[in-house]
């Protein structure tokens, strides 16, 4: 997918410690032409749970809302462990594994995380509806997005691949500016984890220079806890759960 890491292993480890059991991803609405809208999307109908004993009826029979974002996500170990311990992941993967539908692979994890299933490390507050999808893509001019923390990119929508004067590198691929050495300043100052798109046979110098940045410790700073709490309600919720102050009825998303 032409992603390239721009953080050192130490920085990635520090970010993981900071997030603890918070997962970071976007929550856009799934496009109905990209998944089977006629299928039964209730957990009971999907036979989602390995053992339905003790699972509230409200969860079992409520139709899940299909969500979409980027494949680049940050998942906590707690949430991943709960997915495999409690859910029939083979059935989930089969539902989303449809190579005839474009972009369906960008829906599975987001759908499981945003629809409350009682999983460990899962966001409980439905902030998506309250915030009008503030955790979605930067290209839709939404305030708070996954891409502000995870992936640095520059969009130029509805333009053909090839020469694009709006890109510093003068080249566009799939509506995204291809990173060349012209973007090294932005890369060195970015708090994000990845850049996209980096195409090695377009400008391999970008790869070499970024690796030299990482070696010399000249990468951008990681986001801090205050910034994450003020921009990502799931981080705020998990913090409050950790210190025993979370109340779903009074929780304010942001």
Image: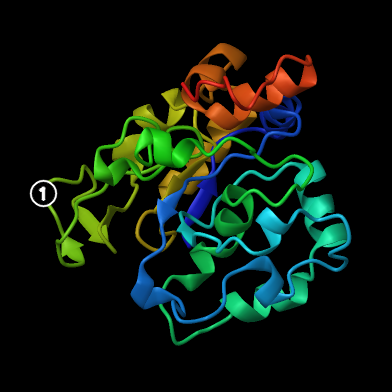
Residue with the most extreme bottom position: 100
Question: In the figure, residue 134 lies in which quadrant?
Answer: top left
Residue 120: image location, x then y, percent:
79, 43
Front one among 186 and 231: 231
Residue with the most extreme left position: 165
On the rendered structure, is 193 left or right of 185?
Answer: right
User: Callout 1: 10 Å neighbours few (<14), some, many (20+)?
Assistant: few
Q: Residue at x 68, y 45 (%)?
A: 75
Q: Residue at x 41, y 41 (%)?
A: 129
Front one among 250 and 21: 250
Q: Residue at x 29, y 38 (%)?
A: 182
* Residue bearing mark 1: 165
SS for callout 1: loop
Question: Does residue 34 lie above or below 99 as drawn?
Answer: above
Residue 184: image location, x then y, percent:
38, 33
Front one among 175 and 73: 73
Front one among 105 and 194: 105
Residue 128: image location, x then y, percent:
45, 41
């Amino acid at each position: 997918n032409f992603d390239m890491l721009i953080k050192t292993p130490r920085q990635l480890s520090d970010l993981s410690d900071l997030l603890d059991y918070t997962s970071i991803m976007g929550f856009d609405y799934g496009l109905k032409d990209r998944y089977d809208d006629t299928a039964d999307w209730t957990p009971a109908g999907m036979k989602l749970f390995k053992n339905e004993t003790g699972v509230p009826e409200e969860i079992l029979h409520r139709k899940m809302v299909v969500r979409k974002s980027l494949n680049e996500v940050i998942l906590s170990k707690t949430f991943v462990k709960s997915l495999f311990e409690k859910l029939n992941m083979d059935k989930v993967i089969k539902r989303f594994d449809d190579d005839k539908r474009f972009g369906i692979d960008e829906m599975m994890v987001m759908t499981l995380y945003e629809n409350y299933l009682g999983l460990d490390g899962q966001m409980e507050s439905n902030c998506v509806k309250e915030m009008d999808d503030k955790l979605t893509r930067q290209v839709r001019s939404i305030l708070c997005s996954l891409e502000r923390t995870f992936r640095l990119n520059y969009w130029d929508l509805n333009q053909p691949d090839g020469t694009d004067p709006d890109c510093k590198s003068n080249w566009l691929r799939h509506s995204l500016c291809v990173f060349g050495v012209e973007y090294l300043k932005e890369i060195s100052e970015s708090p994000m984890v990845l850049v996209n798109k980096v195409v090695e046979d377009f400008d391999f110098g970008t790869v070499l220079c970024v690796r030299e940045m990482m070696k010399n410790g000249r990468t951008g700073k990681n986001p801090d806890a205050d910034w994450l709490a003020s921009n990502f309600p799931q981080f705020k919720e998990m913090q409050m759960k950790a210190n025993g102050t979370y109340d779903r009825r009074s929780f304010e998303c942001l």
